[in-house]
Amino acid sequence: MLTDGRIVAIKKSTAIDAGKVEQFINEVLILSQINHRDVVKLLGCCLETEVPLLVYEFIPNGTLYQYLHEPNEEFPVLWEVCLRLATEVAGALSYLHSAASIPIFHRDIKCTNILLDEKYRAKVADFGTSRSVSLDQTHLTTLVQGTSGYLDPEYFQSSQFTDKSDVYILGVVLVELLTGQKPVSAVGAKEGKSLAAYFILAMNIGLLSDMLDPKILEHGEKEEIMAVASLAKRCLYLKGRKRPTMKEVAMKLEGIRRQVSPANVQQIDELIECCEADQAFETCSIVSTSTCSQVLSGVTNSVLDVSPINRGHTW
């Protein structure tokens, strides 16, 4: 708590390491260029101490990962909420790519880096590996970094990260929202297959409904679900040039969301008001794979089979 009564969050490095300090400094430089309602706000920093500290606005309701994979009876997973969160994240990333003073590639979008505020609205966070690029720059050539299940196959093969690499990662997040499954399932990990690979196969052989989260099927409109699934598939194209831009993704999701009925929106608002802001999430076991995963586990060939490097969190 600050002297004026504001509650803040402190991000503290767990190790004294030049590389970690560099990521902290990079996060300060990136966030100082950003002003968007769906991006977490950096309030201050201290890089002169033995262990660097960053001070953020406090985001009370955990992460999108917890919302999807650690059930909360007071605020269950609803299709309308998932669609809104997807739209907010895509809008924030579209801003980074095309509306910020200097284009920014996030490079590590995943459900654990999407925070939920007191109204369960998205706040994109963790810009330690993000990079600014010049207006005429089309890609970054870097050592391959990323998280298992999210990594763009094209980037993995070429070491060139583009705006379409962020689009691919968002496509994986969309699949998580649709299926309620983690990017690398217990079955997929054994076979070297990601959730994205199973999703593409399911769509291609007509088994998508077997892979979707039953809660999504129960409460969502079929046309909306199929529209988002189709968009996710486009985001996951192997060739980046065939993927939509982040701006196109954001506009498409906004268009789909406008079809949600006022009655459903009111239901969401009522649930949010009833849910306590300081609700704590409890750890749960790995979500079991769906019937589709079992069916697809026998498939040995996939255009998206990759072995991404898992960088993971170091904070």
Image (tube, rainbow, N blue to C red):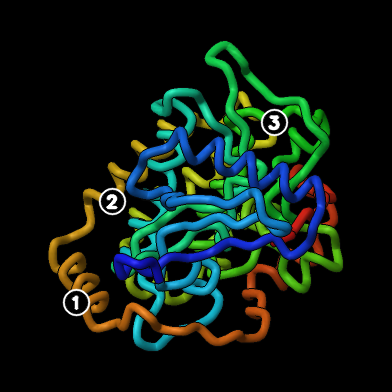
- Whether residue 104 is visible here, answered yes or no, is yes
Quadrant for the C terminus in the image: bottom right
The secondary structure type at the circle numbered 2 is helix
Tag in front: 1 or 2: 1
Quadrant for the N terminus in the image: bottom left
- Residue at which label 2 appears: 257
Q: Decide: is 129 above or below 119.
A: above
The secondary structure type at the circle numbered 1 is helix
- Residue at which label 3 appears: 161
How packed mark 2 is, by other alpha carbons closer than 10 Å (few <14, some 14-19, many 20 or more), is some
Rendered location of residue 22, percent (x, y): 72, 42
Rendered location of residue 120, percent (x, y): 34, 67
Rendered location of residue 262, percent (x, y): 13, 62
Give the residue at x 50% y 83%: 281
Rendered location of residue 213, percent (x, y): 50, 71
The secondary structure type at the circle numbered 3 is strand
Asked if marks 3 and 1 touch (Cβ < 8 Å), the reply is no
Q: Look at label 1 and name its amino acid.
A: Glu
**Label 3 to label 1: alpha-carbon separation:** 41 Å
Query: Which residue is most to the top?
Result: 136
The tag earlier along the polypeptide, 3 or 1, is: 3
The tag earlier along the polypeptide, 2 or 3, is: 3
Per the rendering, the mark at residue 270 is: 1
